[in-house]
Amino acid sequence: MTILDADAAAIVEAMEKAGIPPLYQVGLQAARARAAAVLPSPTPEMTEVTDSSFEGPHGTVPVRVYRPTETANAPAIVYFHGGGMIMGTLDTFDGLARNLAASCEAVVISVDYRLAPEHPYPVANDEAYEALAWAHRSAHDLRIDPARIAVAGDSAGGTLAAAAALHARDESGPPILAQLLFYPGVEREVDRPSMAEFADGPVITRGDIVWMKNAYLGPDPSTDTAYGVPALTEDLSGLPDAIVVSAEADPIRDGVEEYGQRLRAAGVPTALLRYPGVCHGFLSQAASVGRARTAFAEIGALTRTKFAAAR
């Protein structure tokens, strides 16, 4: 039986007392409104935060660039936010982006990709890969080192980061130093033990996951591709070093950890980090969940080491 961390338990208790229903029951607009209402505090402070954009295959894509220190030729992370492909903005994931920049001592480029169901697969994937290519093309203007660019994402954003790494490998595209995958939704499997144990949450339910996957990928799994569902990839060799983070009390935990284990088996240097007693999305709660702060410290130390070795 999973015992929640005290900080996570307090958040879950507050949600239960408020009677907050699962996302799939309230519908798209209410789900987006709920996400937008939880704005993080803008910490830690950055030396510079600027909004920019690039032209992608489906139109203009906004980005927000976080610079923790005034360092020339800095390492960089192209970051894709979570939200099940159906919600999330630059603002709602501002706190996570700042914590990532500060802990990794890297410029973070947060990408405001288009959302489903208005923009189904492969729109977000196309924009994620183009964001990586744009970061490389714009390295001089962004004052970043094109040889030290990683991709990162949480939840749905982790799926996009994993897919961007696969795409870059398959197409001999822009080089990626590392992939930082935080509880990424890399599969559609709903029969794993963690899916059964946490089918009703906390935080996210099995019904939410099915609903959000269908909104982006469509309801028929037979049409899925390896970029939309990275776990379908048969050969994971030749991919960038990986940091794969899982949360113990998360329906998708088992699928996340199997993907990390498969990366290792394929010869990809992979740190597989499970954080006990916390729920899906815990890295967005660093202000109130101590284990999220611990996770950022550990992710940062590993990532900084990889950046330093690549100088």
Image (cartoon, helix red, strand yellow):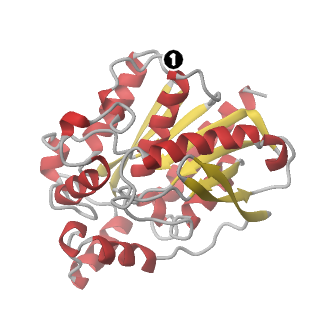
Mark 1, other Cα within 10 Å: few <14 / some 14–19 / many ≥20: some
Quadrant of the rendering where the C terminus is positioned: top right
Residue 57 as seen in the image, left or right of residue 159 = right
- The answer to whether one can see residue 286 in this image is yes
Q: Which residue is drawn at 24% across and 72% down?
A: 27
Quadrant housing residue 150 = top right
Amino acid of disc 1? Gly
Residue in the picture at 25% in, 69% down = 23
Image height of 265 relative to 90, above or below: above
Classify residue 132 as left or right of residue 193.
right
In this rendered view, identify the residue nearer to me: 13 or 140. 140
Q: Nearer the viewer, residue 158 or 293?
A: 158
Residue 252 percent coordinates (x, y): 27, 46
In the rendered image, residue 119, in percent from the top left (x then y), is placed at: 40, 56
> Does residue 240 appear in this view?
no
Residue drawn at 24 percent across, 36 percent down = 223
Res. 138 image quadrant = top right
Number of residue marks: 1
136 relative position to 31: left or right: right
- Residue 112 in percent (x, y) is at 55, 59
Residue linked to disc 1: 238
Residue 217 horizontal/vertical position (percent): 29, 46
Residue that extends furthest to the front in the rendered view of this protein: 58
